Image (cartoon, helix red, strand yellow):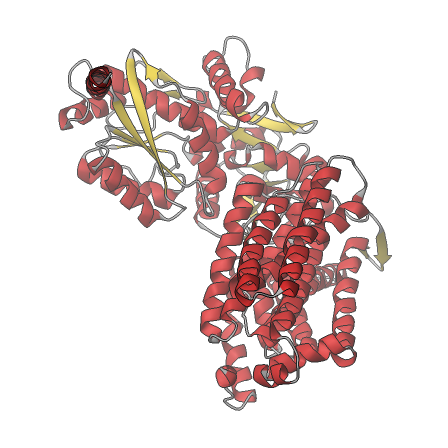
Amino acid sequence: MDFGIFTFLLQDGLNSAAIYCLMAIAIILVFTTTRVLFVAQGDFLVLGALTLSQLQLGRVPGTVWILAGLALLAFAMEGAQALRERSRRRALRAVLFCLLVPALVGGGVAWFSGKELGLAIDILATIALVGPIGPLLYRIAFQPLADKSILVLMVVATAVHFVIISLSLIFFGAEGWRTPALTDAQFALGPVLISGQVIAIIVTSLLLIVVLFLFFSNSVYGKSLIATASNRVGARLMGISTAQSGMLSFAMASAIGCVSGILIGSITTIYYDTGLVLTLKGLIAAVFGGLASFPAAAAGAVILGLIESYSAFFASAYKEIILFSLLIPLLMWRFVLAGHQDLEEEA
Amino acid sequence: MEFRKKMGHVLAAALSVSVMATAAAAEIRIGVLLSTTGPNASIGIPYNNMLTVVPDTFGGESFRLIHLNDASDPSTSVRNARKVINEDKVDIIIGGSSSPAALAIAEVAEETQTPFLALSAVNQQVKGMDWVFVVPHAVDTMLTPVVNDMKAEGVTRVGYIGYSDAWGDIVLGAFQAITEGTGISVVAEERFARADTSVAGQVLKLVAARPDAVLVGASGVAAALPNVTLVERGFKGPIFHTHATIIPEFLRVGGAKVEGAIAPSGPFVVGEQLPEDHPLKATAAAAAALYEAAFGAGSKNAFAGYSYDAFVLAATAAVKAAETAEPGTGAYRAAVRAAIENSGDEVIGATAIYAMTPEDHTGVDERSVVLVQVTDGAFKLKP
């Protein structure tokens, strides 16, 4: 192995690491605030990439229908609750967030698709379409069960995963898609060429870590998320709406997933079912961070990406075995480190 | 008024009974067991699509196709096979979009003595089974023209990159068996998984071994990733694929970076480019017209060709068997089996010529293989 190969594999590994890192961040974010081990996180990535690919072809992406279906379902649930509580404010909110906003977004995208407005508009439209899916899913599937055990929530998350991939199969077909490259820029670093795309991915995930760090340490919303995470009852007594915290964290998760999909959609082929493998790798990184620490999870993602890249070079047939075998010693190590602390302590 | 209404009911009932009776007498039932969801859906859907548009009468007999989806789960394939055999009393089964599914259905077919036309290349595994026939070309039949082309180009060092699953092993095994003693050797062997987002490491190692050509043992769109990465890493030699790669989506995803890729294929996908005197020219055109009328221009693919041929094989034998036995009976199924395996007069399908015998349940030779090359973003017959 010469220096050129070494650096090329390094670049490839960091590239994967950035995506695993984004997955891990979203998984930790959702887990700490809602206790949902959200195994459908990778599906947001898939929806983001596939939606963009459809918009680029000038078609109306199936995501519009997914959004419409979820919005109507959420509206029915919110509306019923508003009727039960006879709350005009809740009813107004339901109309605004579950009907008007999704209708504007979906209708707008359907209206403008095929008009070739350029990549930037397509990306914004993709985020606008996929972003609201997270909070809507939370309202429909998780909010009614918010007090149930971690296990129940994870089973629901698995069910959500299967619903999303089935819908993706119907709307996007069984074959993979690629989006056009965001940038063709390349930089020479010694003997290796580094593509602008890879830099964009790495910078985006670093940026997100910083933004999340600032969000949690400085903003009221971030602090209320932390409060919800550490003690739901206590947070509610302090006047924090745990339902709103849940929706906020799911909104962030779907936006992060969507952005990572847009970033890697042009460097690899995305299938309707690509999400689960990426979620699992993100999960390993998240476990590395004890499902709590963002920087530790980022470190885990880097280690994972590099091991994957170099083992693909040295022993490609055993790559996945090497990768997933890591999870076992990792869990043992976390378990010892955490001093037999039970994740379920709160439930 | 009341009387007339009653009379109408009686008439309608009598009419529907008589219609049902005639239908039941003449109708030949075929069970179609494929995966239209799950990981094998990309293969199962085109297989199934073609079987939804094949004619419902053939040679004067009427056919009813019963479609069941096994969601890419072989144990569901078994349940579906038993269901169509026991409840729908099918005379023939077509299906098995993956090898595990095909083998699972084969067991049931043997046990219940139902003729089964498998749509996966399980030629080796079903040797000795009496009721199972394999429609797709065997892998070694497909790879022989590839090896001949390599010889003609003076290739001696071949790099291999394939799936880390059974398909990757089958392709490599068949390739090594054919090239034994020809002076062509595999100088590097790399593996990847369908869902991998990068094959940079494998491709680096492949290129480092300095092969004259690379063989990709993958399928469909996933085969584009190693090809694209090889081109990006500056590999200039020819890149060969298997017949599992011949789908339009491969071109869409690979774009300019799969230009020049070579693959073997049944003649169906390049039917319009075949010379006028090619025996499959007319049937390939007819099948393509049928498929594209329903699923759009340019939608035809290798899988549709195979499932069309499975129907032609089944229907030809079913018509012949109807002369001696009544559909829905064991004697009829035995007659269908005998008719399929004695198709000595060569059934001409859309993508192959089948000459099955009691010893050879595939009956496809190299006349039914062509090499295609990606030229100007389309699969073109390689001169």
Is residue B268 left or right of A2 when viewed as pictured? left
In the image, residue A251 lies at what x, y percent?
66, 63
Which residue occupies 29% across, 28% down?
Answer: B30
B180 to the left or right of B211: left
Q: Is A179 above or below relative to A321?
A: above
Up-down: is B268 above or below A257? above
- Place residue B116 in its image quadrant: top left
Is residue A48 visible to the viewer in this orientation of the structure?
yes
Above-or-below relation of B62 to B360: above
- Give the mark count: 0
Q: Residue furthest top?
A: B277
Q: Residue at x 53, y 18 (%)?
A: B271
Task: Kindly identify the residue that appears in the image at 47 percent across and 47 percent down.
Answer: B39
- Please state the horizontal and vertical placement of residue B325, each as a whole percent of the image: 15, 18
Q: Nearer the viewer, residue A292 or B183?
A: A292
Q: Is residue B202 visible?
A: no
Quarter of the figure that contains the N terminus of chain A: bottom right
Left or right side of B8 for A168: right
Judging depth in this view, the residue of B320 and A78 nearest the camera is A78
Please, is residue A49 above or below residue B276 in the view? Answer: below
Residue A186 appears at what percent x and percent y?
84, 52
The image quarter in which residue A254 lies:
bottom right
- Residue placed farthest to the front in the image? B1
Please state the horizontal and vertical placement of residue A86, each as a whole percent of the image.
Answer: 57, 65
Residue that appears at 38% across and 43% down: B99
Q: Front-most of B216 and A182?
A: A182
